[in-house]
Amino acid sequence: MLELWKTTTLGQFEAALCTLGRCIDACPDEAWDAPVANLSFCQAAFHALFFVDCYLSVDTDAMLAQAFHREHAAMFRDYEEMEDRAQVLMYSRDQIGAYMGFCREKAVEVITGETEETLAGPSGFYWLEFPRAGIHMYNLRHIQHHAAALSLRLRLDHGIEIRWVKDGWMA
């Protein structure tokens, strides 16, 4: 059953990240810094990826200690995502693209490494008091929430339709 869970969950992560990626790829240059709710398009994309990265980690300390964060210090210059304040930093397409690639690889590594024991253990985040298995479902819902907002903005403002991703492995 664990292998079925891993395969299914990984497929859904890839589908969700494909949906987010389609939004990022389709975003016209003039909309990249334009508002989407209370963030700009690029900030919303970064926010979604930041929490993919965060919730795939065992806790925030592990996330902050990753080599990717040191290698891309300009992108993580003050970790405003972890502060209770409005975001102000903006992100380039190259930065978002690199982060997307990192998150995709991390999802494969983390999900395939889960065990029944780790999935039954704590989420690793004091604000999410459910087992680690639940953090993965929560993470998927968070990706889709932001992908839906970005998709809607693209449709309403630019007439761009983002196709549904049925299966992440076939996208």
Image (cartoon, rainbow, N blue to C red):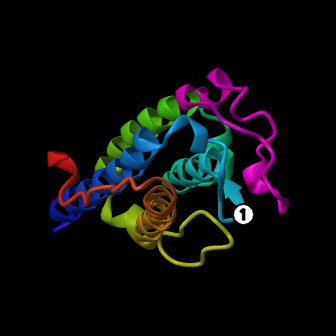
Circle 1 packing at 10 Å, graded few (<14), some (14-19), many (20+), is few
Location of the N terminus by quadrant is bottom left
Q: Is residue 83 magenta?
A: yes
Residue identified by numbered label 1: 38
Which amino acid is tagged 1?
Asn
Q: Can the viewer see residue 155?
A: yes
Write the residue at 53% across / 70% down: 122
Residue at 43 percent across and 64 percent down: it is 144
Relative height, residue 102 to residue 60 (above, below): above
| Residue 30 lies in the magenta stretch | no
Q: Please state which of residues 103 and 89 is positioned toward the viewer in this rendering.
A: 89
Q: Residue furthest right?
A: 85
Q: Which residues are magenta?
A: 67-94
Q: Position of residue 66 (x, y in %)?
A: 60, 33
- The front one of 55 and 11 is 11
| Label 1 SS | loop
For the residue pair 159 and 94, the one nearer the viewer reads as 159
- Dominant SS type (magenta): loop
At horizontal 64% and vertical 31% (from top left) the residue drawn is: 69
Residue 86 in the image, given as x and y percentages of width and height:
82, 58
Residue for point 76% across, 44% down? 79
User: Where residue 32 sits in the image (x, y, percent)?
Assistant: 59, 41
- Of the pair 35 and 95, the residue shown nearer to us: 35
